[in-house]
Image (cartoon, rainbow, N blue to C red):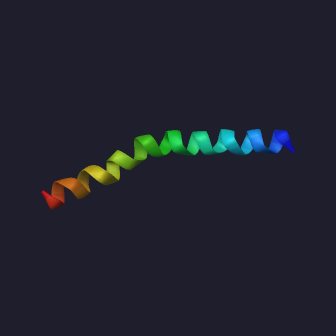
Amino acid sequence: MIKIITEVLLVLSIIIFLLSFIAPEFVKPAKSKSS
């Protein structure tokens, strides 16, 4: 049970890590359009 939880947390951390790079790509164009 604990092993499953640690694997899920590991995957979530990787997804968040990737989103931290991907998110700015979508956020910057949106901010430039509004301003």
Residue 35 vertical position relative to residue 15 in the rendered view, above or below: below
Residue 11 falls in image quadrant: top right
The location of residue 9, given as percent across then percent down, is 68, 42
Q: Quadrant of the N terminus?
A: top right
Residue reaching furthest bottom? 34
- Tell me which residue sits at (17%, 60%) in the image: 33
Q: How many marks?
A: 0
Residue reaching furthest right? 1
- Tell me which residue sits at (59%, 40%) in the image: 13
Q: Is residue 24 left or right of residue 1?
A: left
Residue reaching furthest left? 35
Q: Quadrant of the C terminus?
A: bottom left
- Tell me which residue sits at (33%, 48%) in the image: 25
The location of residue 15, given as percent across then percent down, is 56, 45
The location of residue 27, given as percent across then percent down, is 30, 52
Residue 26 vertical position relative to residue 3 in the rendered view, above or below: below
The location of residue 14, given as percent across then percent down, is 58, 40
- Tell me which residue sits at (39%, 49%) in the image: 23
